[in-house]
């Protein structure tokens, strides 16, 4: 098994994923873990990246015992810098910060250096890697050799001359380092000599469904009732359908229409979950309440907070109403089925969220407060039920298909909890929401018509708070600008912009400017993540 020490990088949990993919058990612990306190013996240690600089006051430090523990160590990004720092090397801010793709030239050391050469076994010369760093090793620590360099990072991969200690500046764990998996595999299987014999209990979706339904029935008992928020997204829909299969109408799904959903979203979710899948669903139209609170607010974090807090209030009120109704029913029909109080709260938490919440969080690690509908309900006095907490997104999709959730929903792009509010760059008003909704519908519609939806991981329209001059029907216009965003990514930690066929862009642009009043220009966002993020706010 592998110990991953987390220094707070956004990508840390992907290292876990890569190890799991090669069927090796791993555990991620905060970087502050003391080796002496460990009650199991890992066969290798991976040090993650970090938002810190090794020379910062208060930068997280690895327990130096890691290097004397007698097992191989691999440092990734900050992990490499931490290795250099601990072994007498130097780390400095780089002249050319690197974000995005870089070409790594692999250096083979040859006879006498078999151990060092093992890390890039099977990779001969160059490989494309994904970088995200502002610091780099500037002086190689003594007794280390260079095993890889990029045009701007002379020490992009290093290995100790006799001990199994390796460092790579690039993020081997992200999918945008296409051969990164092979590097992690070489380390885990060939260098650490782990056996690829671990499998997750839930690997096979159909046995997972059976076991999970039995588990839910057992913990909820004969009467226990469960409430859960749904959003129309894959995770909450799959979780809701699973609960419905397990306990029928004792599960209450609630969809809160916060006024910043997609066009007709509430209606469509109602049709799919309630009419087609039979889930006991209440749709609450709270759009006036949300929009009133959002009035005049421009700051993205403020928008997230308002939506999150208002959501809790609306949801709690709804839970109280459902309980009151059940009691009334009991009064009028005393012999009826006793359903009991709502005791449980369903959350569609996935495995990456679980790892993220146990991992090390540095003071500068928050890029955005990603408010998920579920993540906000911790204060409610309900016990949590999280049927998807062992699964990654692709596994949830496989489950969804087995549970009969329609293909167009299972393959749906994610939609953020704060909705269009973080895609409208200025204050959120009903008019702005309408414009954003209309443009979004056209964009997605044209993407689907062109057969490109499944090639794109997420696509949406951002409404900019600027106006530009245009001419329509011989008249001068002074209207708003929208930007189209479409990215390809496997895990949303890194992403690249999607290359559209020009005629599709032309059609989208022409339809938006013709059909959406108030918009006279359409632009396309060609930023990768990093340095951009997927959303604009
Ligand atoms: P960023 O913009 O951080 O987005 O690159 C990565 C993914 O997260 C989604 N996202 C959110 N989801 N609440 C959510 O539920 C949020 O506050 C939020 N902000 C971003 C985003 O849509 C993308 O899929």
Image (spheres, rainbow, N blue to C red):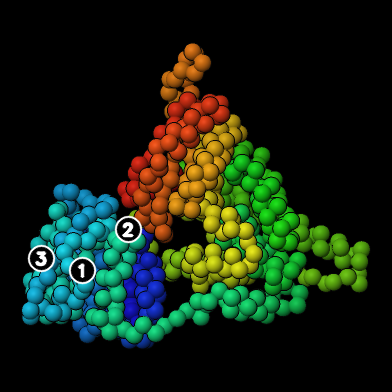
**Looking at the rendering, which quadrant does residue 537 occupy?**
top left
Of residues 512 and 308, the one nearer the viewer is 512
Asked if residue 323 shows in the view, the reply is yes
Alpha-carbon distance for marks 3 and 2?
27 Å
Residue at x 31%, y 69% (from the top left corner): 181
- From the top left corner, tell me how far across and down residue 533 is, in percent: 39, 48
For discs 3 and 2, the disc positioned in front in the rendered view: 2
Mark 3 / mark 1, whichever is N-terminal? 1
- From the top left corner, tell me how far across and down residue 168 is, in percent: 21, 66
Pointers 3 and 1 in contact (CB under 8 A)?
no
User: How many C-alpha atoms fall within 10 Å of the one at disc 3: few (<14), some, or many (≥20)?
Assistant: some
Mark 1 secondary-structure assignment: loop
Which residue position is annotated with label 2?
Answer: 176
Of residues 500 and 366, the one nearer the viewer is 500
User: How many C-alpha atoms fall within 10 Å of the one at disc 1: few (<14), some, or many (≥20)?
Assistant: some
Which residue position is annotated with label 3?
Answer: 140
Mark 3 secondary-structure assignment: loop
Pointers 1 and 2 in contact (CB under 8 A)?
no
- From the top left corner, tell me how far across and down residue 345 is, in percent: 64, 66
């Amino acid at each position: 098994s592998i110990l991953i020490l987390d220094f707070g990088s956004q990508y840390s949990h992907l290292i876990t994923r890569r190890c799991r993919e090669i069927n090796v058990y791993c555990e991620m612990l905060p970087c502050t873990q003391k080796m002496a306190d460990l009650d199991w013996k890992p066969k290798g240690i991976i040090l993650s990246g970090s938002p810190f600089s090794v020379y910062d006051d208060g930068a997280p430090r690895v327990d130096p015992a890691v290097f004397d523990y007698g097992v191989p160590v691999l440092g990734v990004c900050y992990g490499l810098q931490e290795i250099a720092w601990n072994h007498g090397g130097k780390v400095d801010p780089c002249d050319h910060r690197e974000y995005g793709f870089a070409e790594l030239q692999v250096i083979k050391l040859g006879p006498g250096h078999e151990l060092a050469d093992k890390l890039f076994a099977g990779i001969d010369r160059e490989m494309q890697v994904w970088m995200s760093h502002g610091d780099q090793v500037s002086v190689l620590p003594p007794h280390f050799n260079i095993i890889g360099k990029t045009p701007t990072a002379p020490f992009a991969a290093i290995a100790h001359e006799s001990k199994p200690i390796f460092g790579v500046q690039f993020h081997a764990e992200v999918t945008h380092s296409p051969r990164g998996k092979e590097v992690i595999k070489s380390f885990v299987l060939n260098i650490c000599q782990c056996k690829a014999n671990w499998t997750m209990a839930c690997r096979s979706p159909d046995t997972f469904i059976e076991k999970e339904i039995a588990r839910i029935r057992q913990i909820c008992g004969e009467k226990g009732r469960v409430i859960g928020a749904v959003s129309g997204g894959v995770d909450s829909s799959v979780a809701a359908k699973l609960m419905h299969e397990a306990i029928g109408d004792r599960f209450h799904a609630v969809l809160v229409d916060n006024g910043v959903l997609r066009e007709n979203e509430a209606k469509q979710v109602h049709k799919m979950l309630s009419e087609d899948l039979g889930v006991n669903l209440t749709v609450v139209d709270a759009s006036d309440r949300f929009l009133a609170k959002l009035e005049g607010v421009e700051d993205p974090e403020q928008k997230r907070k308002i939506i999150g807090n208002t959501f809790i209030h609306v949801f709690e009120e709804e839970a109280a109403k459902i309980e009151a109704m059940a009691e009334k029913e009991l009064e009028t029909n005393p012999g009826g089925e006793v359903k009991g109080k709502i005791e449980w709260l369903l959350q569609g938490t996935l495995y990456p969220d679980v790892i993220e919440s146990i991992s090390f969080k540095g003071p500068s690690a928050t890029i955005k407060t990603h408010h998920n509908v579920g993540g906000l309900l911790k204060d409610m006095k309900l016990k949590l039920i999280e049927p998807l907490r062992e699964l990654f997104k692709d596994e949830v999709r496989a489950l969804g298909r087995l549970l009969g959730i329609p293909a167009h929903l299972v393959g749906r792009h994610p939609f953020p909890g704060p909705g269009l509010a973080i895609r409208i760059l200025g204050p959120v008003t009903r008019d702005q929401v309408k414009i954003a909704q209309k443009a979004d519908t056209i964009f997605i519609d044209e993407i689907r018509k062109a057969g490109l939806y499944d090639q794109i991981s997420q696509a949406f329209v951002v409404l900019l708070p600027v106006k530009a001059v245009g001419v329509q029907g011989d008249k001068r216009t002074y209207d708003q600008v929208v930007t189209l965003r479409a990215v390809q990514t496997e895990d949303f930690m890194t992403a690249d912009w999607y290359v559209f066929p020009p005629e599709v862009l032309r059609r989208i642009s022409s339809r938006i400017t013709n059909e959406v009043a108030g918009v006279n220009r359409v632009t396309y966002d060609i930023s990768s993540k990093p340095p951009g993020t997927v959303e604009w706010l």
